[in-house]
Amino acid sequence: MTINRVALYDVDSKIPNLALMKLSAYHRANGDHTELYRPLVHSTYSKVYASKVFLYSSAPYLTETMEKGGTGFDLTTKLPPEVEELVPDYSLYGYPHSIGFTMRGCRFRCKFCVVPEKEGKPEGSNTIPEIWTNRESRFVVLLDNDFFGQARWRERIEEIRDLSQ
């Protein structure tokens, strides 16, 4: 069995990139080696994913052979469902906390923001127990754009209260 070397290029995230961590989990489950992208060893990778959050960010090491995704590249690319549902591989960044969304979309239409165009109206996605997979940490980082815009925000608050006891 050949082990593929898969690189994950985080162009501009200020916190660990959730999509890249899920891609890492997917590839590791399939026996591949994953790591954050190192341009000097580009030729040793079987596959490279690049993720960019912001349109204005420069991506100095981007090549045509990379699989690109994220709002900074386009608003339509999404992870396949079998990848989206995975628990993120936090070891990719050595990150000690859990990260996730309890909802996607937004009810506001701020002029500077692409979330309503990309994700639509607010819709629930995950519960707090589904996100809080890194139980060694008491911190959960929610990436929700409009937490109180989702119909089940009270349930999410109750989950936080229940789990914090």
Image (cartoon, grey):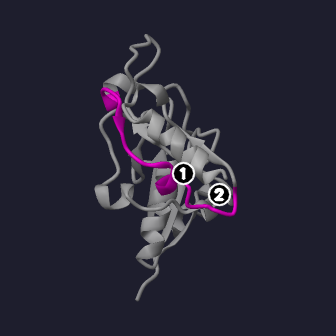
Image: magenta residue range: 118-137
Q: Position of residue 116 (x, y in %)?
A: 35, 23
Q: Amino acid at mark 2?
A: Tyr
Residue visible at 52% across and 47% down? 159
Q: Overall secondary structure of the magenta stretch?
A: loop
Residue visible at 51% across and 30% down? 54
Asked which quadrant contains residue 70, the reply is top left
Most foreground residue, 150 or 67: 150
Vertically, is 64 above or below 122? below
Most foreground residue, 150 or 86: 150
Residue 61 seen in render: no
- C-alpha gap between disc 2 and disc 1: 12 Å
The local crowd at label 2, few if under 14, some if 14 to 19, many if 20 or more residues have their Cα within 10 Å, is some
Q: Which residue has dot 2 on it?
A: 93
Residue visible at 42% across and 52% down? 66
Checking the image for residue 9, the label placed there is: 1
What secondary structure is found at the residue carrying circle 2?
loop
Checking the image for residue 46, the label placed there is: none
Q: Tell whether 43 sits left or right of 114.
A: right
| Contact flag, marks 2 and 1 (Cβ < 8 Å) | no
Vertically, is 1 above or below 162? below
